[in-house]
Image: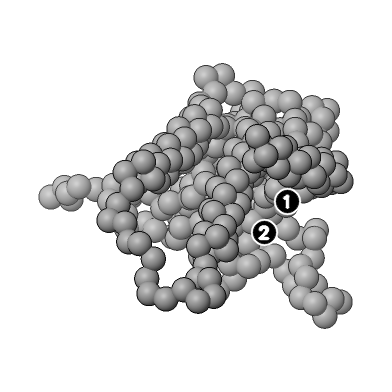
Amino acid sequence: MRSNRRLRWAAIPIAALLSVVLAGCTQEQLQGWLPTEPGTTNNVDRVIGLWVTSWIVLLVVGVLTWGLTIWAIVVYRRRKGQTGLPVQLRYNMPIEIFYTIVPLILVLGFFAFTARDQSAIEAKYDSPDVKIQVFGKQWAWDFNYVDENVYSPGVQGQENPDDANGSLVESEIPVLYLPVGKKVEIELQSRDVIHSFWVIDFLYKKDMLPGKTNYMYVTPEREGTFSGKCAELCGEYHSMMLFNVKVVSQQEYDDYIQSLKDAGQEGQLGPEYNRNQNLPGIGTPAHEEE
């Protein structure tokens, strides 16, 4: 009875402390300091949920582990006057089963929820509203707006001569426009080495492999300008391989597409600019006619 009362009295301040701590958390802390806001895309909330839940589970495991370790150190410490070794046990079957089963459950749980969310994020759009083709190149990006048959070529980020901190000229950074609330299919290709297409606020990135086409499927749900970068070390100027994503209204998107047409940027930038022309099946006939 006394032990039960002690547990109750111990639980009260712990619960009160947790309530105060959680009530004082900012939105940034509640989402695990991830660099985005809920509702940015159709996938962001799913990623935040998986991330935060995983950390909560790991923190609980950590607190229990450290708590039991400290408890064992205090309770079973050598008392004054004691000599020799304590009674040695060869094994404790319930404890061994416990610390075998619990980690197995945790690993299977993490795997199951990760596989579930990955399957949802990677789900292909049968009828995307917008199709974009992205080419990564050392060290910039080319964007093809497939349905509208226009393109936007990118150049490597240029250092700002007026900034001693080495920032880049914002107007020179390639920009990808996306309409808000539309299903977007993004086709990813590389012209030279391995790159990685990463829109930071979208909480998702995907590698761009020479000779292989990858796809991303996303629905932007909040207007704004979001930073992007190459997330794979791709050479000397990798740090300057930046881009921005502007999520805008349909009218603004249509106006931008028209501006590309007015600038004469109709058509598509294709694989003919690839530096890897010696890959199997690219531009080289299987045999020469005699």
Residue 165: numbered disc: none
Question: Image height check: is 64 above or below 252?
Answer: below
CA–CA distance in space, label 2 to label 1:
22 Å
User: Can residue 120 be seen by looking at this rendering?
Assistant: yes
Res 112 quadrant in image: top left
Of the 4 image quadrants, the one containing the N terminus is top right
Q: Position of residue 84 (x, y in %)?
A: 38, 74
Q: Residues within 10 Å of mark 1 (few under 14, many from 20)?
A: few
Q: Amino acid at mark 1?
A: Trp
Question: Image height check: is 212 above or below 87?
Answer: above
* Element on which disc 1 rests: loop
Residue 242: numbered disc: 2
Q: Residue at x 75, y 33 (%)?
A: 39
Residue 85 left/right relative to 216:
left
Q: Closer to the camera: disc 2 or disc 1?
A: 1
Q: Residue furthest front?
A: 81
Q: Position of residue 58 (x, y in %)?
A: 57, 47
* Element on which disc 2 rests: strand
Q: Amino acid at mark 2?
A: Leu
Point out the tag, 2 or 1, that comes first from the N-terminus.
Answer: 1
Q: Position of residue 98 (x, y in %)?
A: 40, 41
Mark 1, residue position: 33
Q: Residue at x 33, y 48 (%)?
A: 92
Nearer to us in this view, 13 or 249? 13
Q: Residues within 10 Å of mark 2 (few under 14, many from 20)?
A: many
Res 53 quadrant in image: top right
Q: How is colour applied across the structure in the image?
A: one colour
Residue 96 left/right relative to 170:
left
